[in-house]
């Protein structure tokens, strides 16, 4: 599918999605820097067949965002806005990978139309990206939470709840949306579980239990997602 471009293709999710869409063009900072409007213009001029961009590129760690505010603004907000303009001018469908952290994280099982109220700077930066994408007509916003296929940490939160799935599982669902004609906002993920339970579901052993109360960055308690729209649209059998 040479008509698809994946930004952030060197990142964990972008690289995994690239395996599900093996003919997609891999966009990296070297050939498609989302903060460089001139580079993106030249790229699209040379690749006129592209009709869909899956936008995975982002600064994603809440602690890292707190340490690199300017970089987060540049990548997550300005970069997404520049990409949105480029797609708008060419009527390219923009599929934006957002986050469950755009919600307050108090009640869980959030639906697509629920109130958005980020609790940390990372989440605000991703919501800033959503605002730019919402200006388009030809767009998809996918809210999700993902992690590596093998849980990489020695400890996990017992008091934070999520619909997180492995990158491989999430990539398959993103592919289903990308190759369809769906437009709008949609949530994807698994069943509601604590991060600790999520780690165990991946086969992790000897995982220590920790609390979000011990974090220096404010973390939402329950950002689990209601994924019934996805189930209705893509799991009809």
Image (tube, helix red, strand yellow):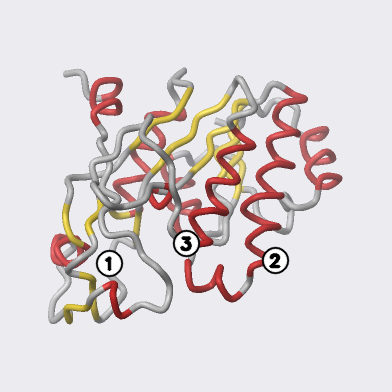
SS for dot 3:
loop
Residue 34 location (% of width, % of height): 71, 49
Residue beneath disc 3: 120
Q: Which residue is mark 1?
A: 150
Relative to 5, residue 30 above or below: below
Residue shown at 25% from the left, 36% from the top: 226
Q: Say what secondary structure mark 1 lies in.
A: loop
What is the C-alpha distance between the residues marked 1 and 2?
31 Å
Mark 2 residue crowding within 10 angstroms, few (<14) / some (14–19) / many (20+):
few
The residue located at (53%, 53%) in the rendering is 124
179 or 158, nearer to the observer: 158
Q: Is residue 29 left or right of residue 182?
A: right
- Quadrant of res 220: bottom left
Kindly indicate the quadrant of the structure image that contains residue 40: top right
Residue at left offset 35%, top offset 36%: 187
Quadrant where the C terminus is found in the figure: top left
Q: Nearer the viewer, residue 86 or 143?
A: 143
> Disc 3, disc 1: CB below 8 Å?
no
Q: Nearer the viewer, mark 3 or mark 1?
A: 3
Q: Looking at the image, is mark 1 or mark 2 earlier in the sequence?
A: 2
Q: Are marks 3 and 2 in contact (CB under 8 Å)?
A: no
SS at mark 2 in the image: helix
Q: Position of residue 164 (x, y in %)?
A: 28, 53
């Amino acid at each position: 599918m040479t008509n698809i471009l994946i930004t952030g293709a060197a990142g964990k999710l972008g690289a995994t999605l690239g395996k599900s869409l093996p003919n997609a063009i891999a966009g990296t900072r070297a050939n498609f820097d989302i903060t460089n409007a001139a580079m993106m213009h030249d790229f699209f001029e040379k690749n006129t067949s592209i009709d869909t961009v899956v936008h995975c590129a982002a600064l994603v760690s809440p602690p890292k965002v707190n340490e690199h505010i300017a970089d987060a603004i540049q990548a997550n907000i300005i970069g997404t806005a520049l990409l949105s303009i480029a797609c708008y001018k060419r009527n390219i469908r923009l599929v934006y990978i957002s986050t469950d952290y755009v919600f307050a994280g108090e009640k869980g099982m959030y639906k697509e139309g629920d109130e958005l109220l980020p609790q940390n700077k990372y989440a605000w930066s991703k919501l800033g990206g959503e605002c730019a994408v919402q200006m388009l007509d030809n767009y998809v916003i996918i809210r999700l939470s993902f992690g590596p296929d093998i849980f990489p940490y020695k400890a996990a939160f017992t008091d934070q709840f999520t619909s997180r799935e492995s990158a491989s599982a999430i990539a398959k669902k993103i592919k289903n949306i990308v190759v369809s004609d769906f437009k709008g906002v949609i949530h994807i993920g698994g069943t509601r579980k604590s991060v600790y339970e999520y780690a165990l579901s991946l086969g992790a052993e000897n995982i220590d239990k920790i609390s979000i109360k011990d974090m220096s960055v404010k973390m939402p308690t329950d950002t689990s997602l209601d994924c019934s729209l996805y189930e209705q649209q893509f799991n009809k059998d």
